[in-house]
Image (tube, rainbow, N blue to C red):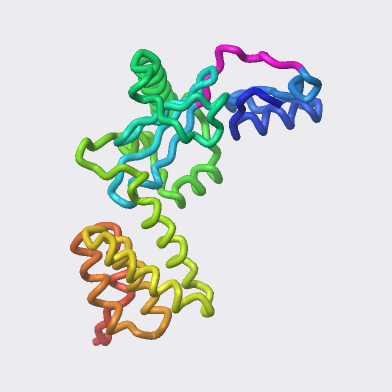
Amino acid sequence: MREFSGLVDITPTICAALGIEGPQHVPGRDLTENFYGKEGLYPDRSIFSYSIEPKKYGANPLLSVIFGNYKYIHTTTPELYNISNDVYERRNLIDVEPNRVSALRELLLNMVDDFAARVRDGRTEFDSETVRRLESLGYVGAADWAANLDFDPLASDPNDLVDYHDLMQIARAYVWPDNRAEALSAAESMIEMRPDLFNGYVMKGKILIVMDRRDDALPYLERAAELDPEGTRAELLTARPQEPAD
């Protein structure tokens, strides 16, 4: 299949292949005819995607739209690629095609506004289990979702934090005892790389706690609380010695 597709297409395509009616609120497309060699089914289609993961590191979010053969990425340093002949996105055309950049940026921001309005107005429905899962991932409502897509001109570019993010994944492996030494080293590297971010301090504090080193953990969690007063409160309370009951 040569046409571009997204994860949203999985449900309607599977439902069509099984001969059952899919959910009406899912925005994806049925791609079963592509399996039989048909192309150009949705020539005017645009595919929107986003990631707010960089916001955890004080960076701007990543938004993107695919339209035709082009992919536009909207973040601190925007990018444009012709993905029909540059699949690995190595040649940034942002300065080569300013008119296309302007058009795709406008398309993308309109899609963001439309989706936020759909969620806010209740036109995109979620069952209670979906809401619970979204909340567990940090998505707590339309207003928060929209706020997470706001851009700060002074915020870091997500591309500059790839190494930091990779260290974060290593540090998170502390839940397995055999990985704790490597995880601790990763957390220390995070602090050295970006001492202004709370994440490394939190991770080092958590790792020291599971290593039964609460006294050592406390200064790191206190520093994290200074940098992120709301987000690290639970970890700090866990590390502090409990007052004896009267």
| Place of residue 105 in the rendered image (x, y in percent of width and height, measured from the top left) | 36, 21
Q: Residue at x 25, y 83 (%)?
A: 243
Residue 219, compared with residue 26, is above or below; it is below
| Place of residue 246 in the rendered image (x, y in percent of width and height, measured from the top left) | 24, 87
Most common secondary structure along the magenta stretch? loop
Query: Quick check: is 176 in the magenta stretch?
Result: no
Residue 54 visible, this angle: yes
Residue 234 visible, this angle: no
Judging depth in this view, the residue of 237 and 195 nearest the camera is 195
Q: Quadrant of residue 101?
A: top left
Q: Residue at x 45, y 74 (%)?
A: 182
Q: Residue at x 53, y 79 (%)?
A: 178
Q: Write the start and end of the magenta stretch as one range.
A: 38-47
Residue 147, compared with residue 123, is above or below; it is below
| Place of residue 28 in the rendered image (x, y in percent of width and height, measured from the top left) | 60, 26
- Figure disc tally: 0
The quadrant of the rendering that contains the N terminus is top right
| Place of residue 48 in the rendered image (x, y in percent of width and height, measured from the top left) | 48, 27
Residue 141, compared with residue 95, is above or below; it is below
Judging depth in this view, the residue of 66 and 18 nearest the camera is 66
Query: Quick check: is 43 in the magenta stretch?
Result: yes
Q: Residue at x 71, y 28 (%)?
A: 13
In the rendered structure, the answer to whether residue 61 lies left or right of residue 132 reads left
Residue 220, compared with residue 139, is above or below; it is below
